[in-house]
Amino acid sequence: MSEIKGIYAASVSILDENLALNIDKTINHIENLINQGCHGVAVFGSTGQAQLISVAEKIQLINNLTKSIYKEKYIIGTGLNSLSETINFMKVCISLDFNKFLIMPPAYYKYGDEEVISYYSRIVEQIPNSKIILYNFEKLCGYKFSINCIKELTKKFPKQIIGVKDSSYNLFENLKINNFSIFPGSEGKLLKGLEIGCSGIITATCNVTAPLARKVYEDFYNQREQSKNEKLCDVRKVFEQFNLISALHTFLSQKDEDYNNLLPTLSILNPKDKKKLLDDLSSLDFKLTKLETA
């Protein structure tokens, strides 16, 4: 049995007009994702602008997240290149009883499996009570996990390395490890992943597709005919026409203008692209009002 299973959103972060992290609104958004159908939420992943938000603001949010009624359902992304800052941030999270982490290898520098194993080994040795989901996204960090690398890490740290988010899609069809969670990073891979033994998904677009994704997940496990998977995949394809963060914030800004606030060099969609996004979603009968009442 996988340690973590289900539909997980990689949550957006909400900023105020001065581009400071709005703690209350971000936590409200995170909790609402679970109310809409997510089993849990990854906080401060790449979708949450984690690489751009200050450590101090992250710690402030984590402190407030301890009050959440869904505290046990969160995975904390680190979003830091520095090994020491990653470890220090994780220690703060551990002290507040958050022990599940989504960690991508550092960006910019070129390296291979041996260096990645060393990187995660140093983290686990410093924080042995952590539960780590590896973040496989070559597009962002320049490194793509190999099956051998993951098998070596799980062999070395079976209690700490518990899963992988596969956004490069070279793993989820071929990686087979007992008691290990595998999450493709797209709704388009959800049903296929479940059919071959994956644990669910962790995706950006679950910020708006949570009810649909949960329906597909539940229908699979209850052996019911799929009625929403096609629409779920079609909605994902619409968002994939654009930068996902830009498109999600543009869509969500219909209910709150603060979603328009993004840290440079991110931006919301230009008027032409915004119109196409909303028109394409409307053609699928996918609207914010329906999402909010789902």
Image (spheres, grey):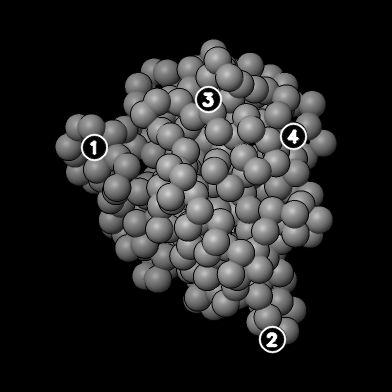
- Amino acid carrying label 1: it is Glu
Q: Which class describes the residues within 10 Å of circle 3: few (<14), some (14-19), or many (20+)?
A: many
Kind of element beneath mark 1 = helix
User: Mark 2 against mark 3, which lies toward the viewer?
Assistant: 2
Please name whichever residue, 249 or 165, is drawn nearer the observer in this view of the structure.
Answer: 249
Query: Foreground: 266 or 121?
Result: 266
Question: Which residue is identified by label 1?
Answer: 115
Q: Are marks 4 and 2 in contact (CB under 8 Å)?
A: no
Which residue is at 43% across, 50% downward?
272
Which corner quadrant holds the C terminus? bottom right
Asked if labels 1 and 3 touch by Cβ distance under 8 angstroms, the answer is no
Report the disc number at residue 90. 3
Closer to the chain start, of discs 3 and 1, is 3
Determine whether label 2 and label 3 are within 8 Å by CB. Answer: no
Q: State the separation of the CA atoms marked 2 and 3.
A: 42 Å
Q: Between tags 2 and 1, which lies in front? A: 2
- The mark that comes first in sequence, 2 or 3, is 3
> Which residue: 75% across, 54% down?
289
Residue 172 found in image quarter: bottom left
